[in-house]
Amino acid sequence: MQSGGRQAEAPGRGPRVLVVGGGIAGLGAAQRLCHHPAFSHLRVLEATARAGGRIRSEHSFGFLKKHLDTFFEPPLPTEKVEAIRKIGFGTNNKIFLEFKEPFWEPDCQHIQVVWEDTSPLEDAAPALHDAWFKKLIGFWVLPPFHRASHVLCGFIAGLESEFMETLSDEDVLRSLTKVLRRVTGNPWLPAPRSVLRSCWHSAPYTRGSYSYVAVGSSGDDMDRLAQPLPSDGKGAQLQVLFAGEATHRAFYSTTHGALLSGWREADRLVKLWDP
């Protein structure tokens, strides 16, 4: 995409914009631009028929960190490469458990899990295989979408979340059944009849869930990542713009951060065309 001002375009034509990725940031940018009369030559490049972000199609920040040396040709500027390497990218997964009948009270909204026999101050952490489930912070009771729907949603993050992805559904179901039986004090509590979980770390095009300010990085790195190429200085002819939650200094790691970053880059183009 090139946009250098109204005089640089032929009559009746506008800048040609290609939005790569139909995720939240990409759709946000496209939505903003399609309401401006100058951007009639707008295309969204998405690898599947379903927009909104897909594990197999949208290259997230985790994918970019893993393939940094080969993804761009020519390579990114040094300062942008260093920013990408410094910014952290973590994993947070959801585990959905479906039950034939609810064991919780009708007004229950959340089941908190507190482990009394562990401490983060211990010198030696237990093996992940024996204690990965202790990273669960609890379960949320999801509103039923039909009468036979009884579902709990658990959240797990960090290395334990990554380890969980290596297990089979049967192993996860077995471990969490033991957890719920211990929490409720009912050794005969029926096991969930099905499990569904996300696996963001092992998905090749995501390699994680969200960005964060890692040790040695700062918000300045996110600002550098957000800078367009080759420059956004006065009179520059922008060719590549960057959006996504990892480029938002205030709202990184959030859905609204991704949306706001898409709007930000769309507004950047609009200002160039209609200052």
Image (tube, rainbow, N blue to C red):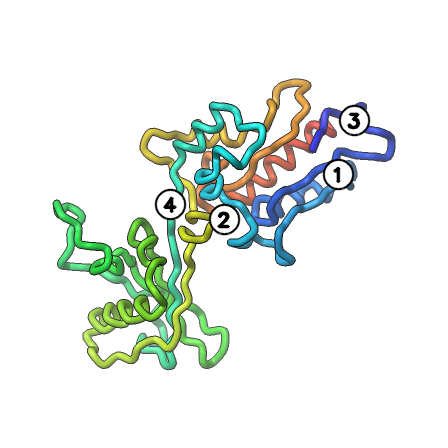
Q: Secondary structure at mark 2?
A: loop
CA gap, disc 3 and disc 2: 37 Å
Front-most of 204 and 119?
A: 204
The kind of residue on which mark 4 rests is Gly
CA gap, disc 1 and disc 2: 29 Å
Q: Is residue 74 above or below residue 125?
A: above
Residue reaching furthest to the right: 11
Residue reaching furthest to the front: 70
Residue wearing tag 4: 90
Report whether residue 141 is seen.
no
Front-most of 105 and 48?
A: 48
Tag 4 and tag 3, C-beta contact below 8 Å: no
Q: State the residue at coordinates (53%, 53%).
A: 56
CA gap, disc 4 and disc 1: 36 Å
Query: Mark 4 or mark 1, which is nearer to you?
Result: 4
Q: Earlier in the sequence, mark 1 or mark 2?
A: 1
Crowding at dot 2, Cα within 10 Å, few <14 / some 14-19 / many 20+, comes out as many
Q: State the residue at coordinates (26%, 70%).
A: 180
CA gap, disc 4 and disc 3: 42 Å
Q: Earlier in the sequence, mark 4 or mark 2?
A: 4
Crowding at dot 1, Cα within 10 Å, few <14 / some 14-19 / many 20+, comes out as many
Side (left or right) of 78 relative to 215: right
Could you say which quadrant of the image residue 194 lies in? bottom left
Residue 185 picture location, percent across and down: 19, 74
The kind of residue on which mark 1 rests is Phe
Query: Mark 4 or mark 3, which is nearer to you?
Result: 4
Residue wearing tag 2: 205
- The circle on residue 6 is 3
Q: Is residue 101 above or below residue 184?
A: below
Side (left or right) of 134 relative to 36: left
The kind of residue on which mark 2 rests is Tyr
